[in-house]
Image (cartoon, rainbow, N blue to C red):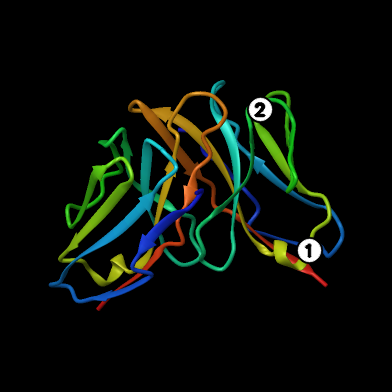
Amino acid sequence: DTEVTQTPKHLVMGMTNKKSLKCEQHMGHRAMYWYKQKAKKPPELMFVYSYEKLSINESVPSRFSPECPNSSLLNLHLHALQPEDSALYLCASSQDRSGSYNEQFFGPGTRLTVL
Amino acid sequence: DAKTTQPTSMDCAEGRAANLPCNHSTISGNEYVYWYRQIHSQGPQYIIHGLKNNETNEMASLIITEDRKSSTLILPHATLRDTAVYYCIVRAATSGTYKYIFGTGTRLKVLA
């Protein structure tokens, strides 16, 4: 199984709502990533978890809260978002080892719209 | 962190080779170069990666210059399905893990 799954595919939320994005992989990867992608722009790294610990937070506002309950799951909790947070949110995973075989596998993304 | 620069867009005739350049002049000795492509806001798809030697797989070839400051992705016989945004990425070690730093991407259009 070389797949990263993300749910939901689409999400519309108001600025006062609380919602969560979910990501799952069963490849035994120990690094998991959240990216945000605006239209016609490259993905921007938000968070990296390595061995279930938060390793990198790219100065993301606290209205985005990541969680890694176990090595297969990654959540992104959303609260009090702004319309400019509307974007495609991508999850990825990789083996997180030194050396060559460390390609990232991406999920299909969640298209988020904040009203 | 090493950064990459890529042309914004390129056209290629169907059946011809597509050569996509990338500059990564600040790359460090142990940082790999990865190429991904993204079709229509789907998740990026892995193509190929390398450190200093040229690499080839069933999808593409990667040519890295001897000084490692630039590379070229080659799609040998482009088809209409290769129309996509192609990202050149440097993988950098940091904070006990790795960051994959995306370039701005090249929008490749394959023409019939």
The numbered disc on residue B68 is 2
Mark 2: few, some, or many residues within 10 Å (few <14, many ≥20)? many
Cα distance between the residues tagged 2 and 1: 29 Å
Q: Which residue is mark 1?
A: B79
Q: Is residue B84 above or below residue A32?
A: below
Q: Is residue B82 left or right of residue A19?
A: right
Q: Marks 2 and 1: CB-CB under 8 Å?
A: no
Q: Chain of mark 2?
A: B
Helix, strand or loop at label 1? It is: loop
Question: Identity of the amino acid at label 2?
Answer: Arg
Query: Residue B69 placed where, x, y %?
Result: 65, 30
Residue that lies at the very extreme toward the top in this rendered image:
B29
Q: Is residue A16 above or below residue A106?
A: below
Rendered residue at 44%/42% (across/down): A27
Helix, strand or loop at label 2? It is: loop
Q: Chain of mark 1?
A: B
